[in-house]
Amino acid sequence: MTHHVGEEESTLLPEMREKMAASQLDELGRAFLKSRREHLGEEPADITKAEMEQQAANADISGASGMSKSELKEELEAAAEE
């Protein structure tokens, strides 16, 4: 499963970001977050900083590697609300 997640984050998601309109990406992101909350809760407690850094890269958040885990969480939450 880890291989598939890595493949999606390195291939599929960047292509979607390039080819889809911002409104489509926003709609897709909101649907994903809603489904994730319904099935997993707000956020898995065991998420690693590396996983959060990948999420930040997907959200075009720069400087993630220099942030603490709590700072990164705040940035990801802010980006999700935009």
Image (cartoon, rainbow, N blue to C red):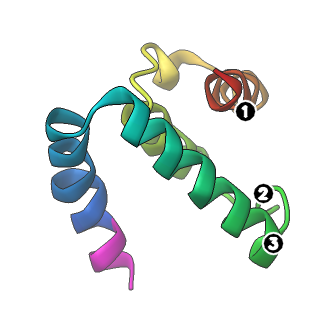
Question: Mark 1 Cα within 10 Å, few/some/many (few <14, many 20+)?
Answer: some
Instruction: Report the mark closest to the observer, 3 or 1.
Output: 3
At horizontal 36% and vertical 70% (from top left) the residue drawn is: 5
Tell me where residue 49 appears, x and y as whole percent.
Answer: 60, 44
Looking at the image, residue 41 sits to the left or right of residue 46; the answer is right
At label 3, the amino acid type is: Glu
Q: Are marks 1 and 2 in contact (CB under 8 Å)?
A: yes
Marks 3 and 1 sit apart, C-alpha to C-alpha, by 20 Å
Decide: is 47 above or below 41. Answer: above
Tell me where residue 76 appears, x and y as whole percent.
Answer: 64, 30
At horizontal 56% and vertical 43% (from top left) the residue drawn is: 52
* SS class, disc 2: loop
Residue 48 visible, this angle: no
Residue 14 lies in quadrant: top left
At label 1, the amino acid type is: Lys
Question: Mark 3 Cα within 10 Å, few/some/many (few <14, many 20+)?
Answer: few
The dot on residue 73 is 1
At label 2, the amino acid type is: Glu
Residue 12 lies in quadrant: bottom left
* SS class, disc 3: helix
Looking at the image, residue 59 sits to the left or right of residue 66; the answer is left
Mark 3 and mark 1 lie on one chain; the one further toward the N terminus is 3
Q: Classify the position of the C terminus by image quarter.
A: top right
Q: Nearer the viewer, residue 70 or 19?
A: 19
Magenta segment boundaries in residue numbering: 1-5
Tell me where residue 8 appears, x and y as whole percent.
Answer: 27, 63
Marks 2 and 3 sit apart, C-alpha to C-alpha, by 11 Å
**Residue that mark 2 sits on:** 43
Mark 1 and mark 2 lie on one chain; the one further toward the N terminus is 2
Q: Nearer the viewer, residue 28 or 55?
A: 28
**Residue that mark 3 sits on:** 38
